[in-house]
Image: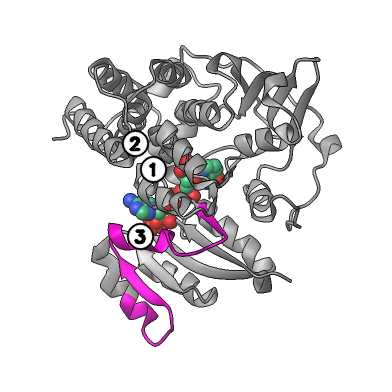
Amino acid sequence: MTVRRISILGATGSVGSSTLDLIRQDRDRWQVVALTANCQAQELARLAREFSAEVAVVADEAHLPELRGALNGTPVTAAGGAAALTEAAARPADITVAAIVGCAGLAPTMAAIEQGQVVALANKEALVSAGDVMMAAVERAGTVLLPVDSEHNAIFQCLAGNDLAHVRSITLTASGGPFRDWSAAQLAVATPAQAVRHPNWAMGAKISVDSATMFNKGLELIEAWHLFPVGLDRLRIIVHPQSVVHSMVEYRDGSTLAQLGPSDMRVPIASCLAWPGRMDTPLPPLDLAALGELTFRAPDEVRFPATRLCREAAEAGGAMPALLNAANEVAVAAFLAGQISFTRIADTVAQVLDVSNDAAPPRSLDDVLWIDRAARQRAQSVLELV
Ligand code: NDP
């Protein structure tokens, strides 16, 4: 049995926990290299002890003394801060699961890619912001980016053994989120507690809000555009409330291949961990007879303008996707903090994009990070938070 070295960036989060759950099942196959968090030092220390990690890192250095205290007397190295996070991501590993939320995950993900590690990417904001810069790094390093996002993982599986040149279209499915059937008047007064209550998936707060606004699907459209270069005009979105069909690829001969499965992230994560093979997951088999019916409908871009804004940002190219992502991150944080209304999230992103159409395209990681910082300031001033 080959033991594989794995690092998990964002180990204390929803995707991180699902990944560790799979590793727990088959403990002897894995050597855990680095586990990281932002500020949950106690939880990170608990995981680092359980999985005998080589290093545990809190990105927020203020929590390093707490982490050190919690790991005292163990062989785990404790570290903190942005540089330590990037150094940990660059440690030799066979696979790195990039599961930090937001553009904060970009630099460590790039560090793992540059070391030639296979990266299982959940952190869609990093790819949306860095786009061509990240894909060029993947190519330079001669490595593989495995998509963890259930839709992209589905597409990756449906494309296996096929040529992109034969693809007529790729359709991303969207649950439509908790507000799928809400009126514009209801959306205007939606609360953070309502937004994070997703009907099908248990996820972190930020992606849950993105799912409610449909920015999640828009970000996924940009993610798919980079991962599967068939052209934006061949990428579609369809609302599928049951979240059973995770995405589809239509070929030129009229065949459509779809991937189905339970709405549990352990399925796409397992597909990445075992790639190019397969592994068991502790999930009940899909029971289509019990589900009864699968339904589909077109997205409503009037109530949910996010997918249109994302498509337009991708079409404009250059710095626009990074600007859009940063503005969305700021607006979602403000909504979760009770500072702005739900519908103001998309309005803020639109306003930031309107005033930023002269930004130069990023050519390096530093360029992307600079654009990200500038867009955050702009979003904060649009929201009058500075
Ligand atoms: P969570 O909020 O549950 O977890 C985020 C993780 O990132 C935590 O470990 C957190 O640490 C860490 N983190 C947060 N901020 C920073 C920072 N500034 N620097 C370093 N680390 C940080 O998020 P999810 O697991 O839900 O999502 C992670 C990523 O995966 C997102 O990009 C999301 O879009 C994507 N994704 C998630 C899915 C899901 O089902 N959850 C599905 C598909 C994609 P701490 O705990 O200390 O705050």
Confirm or reject: label 3 Cβ below 8 Å from ligand 1. Answer: yes
Q: Which amino acid does label 1 sit on?
A: Gly
- Please state which of residues 242 and 319 is positioned toward the viewer in this rendering: 319
Q: What residue type is labelled 3?
A: Leu
Q: At which x and y percent is residue 206?
A: 42, 41
Q: Give the magenta part as a residue range.
A: 68-97
Q: Which residue is rendered at x = 51% and y = 53% of the image?
A: 116
**Disc 3 to disc 2, how far (Cα)?**
21 Å
Q: At which x and y percent is residue 300?
A: 53, 14
Confirm or reject: label 2 Cβ below 8 Å from ligand 1. Answer: no
**Disc 2 to disc 1, how far (Cα)?**
7 Å
Crowding at dot 3, Cα within 10 Å, few <14 / some 14-19 / many 20+, comes out as many
Q: Mark 2 points at which residue?
A: 329
Secondary element type, mark 2: helix
Q: Does the magenta stretch include residue 224?
A: no
Q: Which mark is residue 85?
A: 3
Left or right side of 83 for 162: right
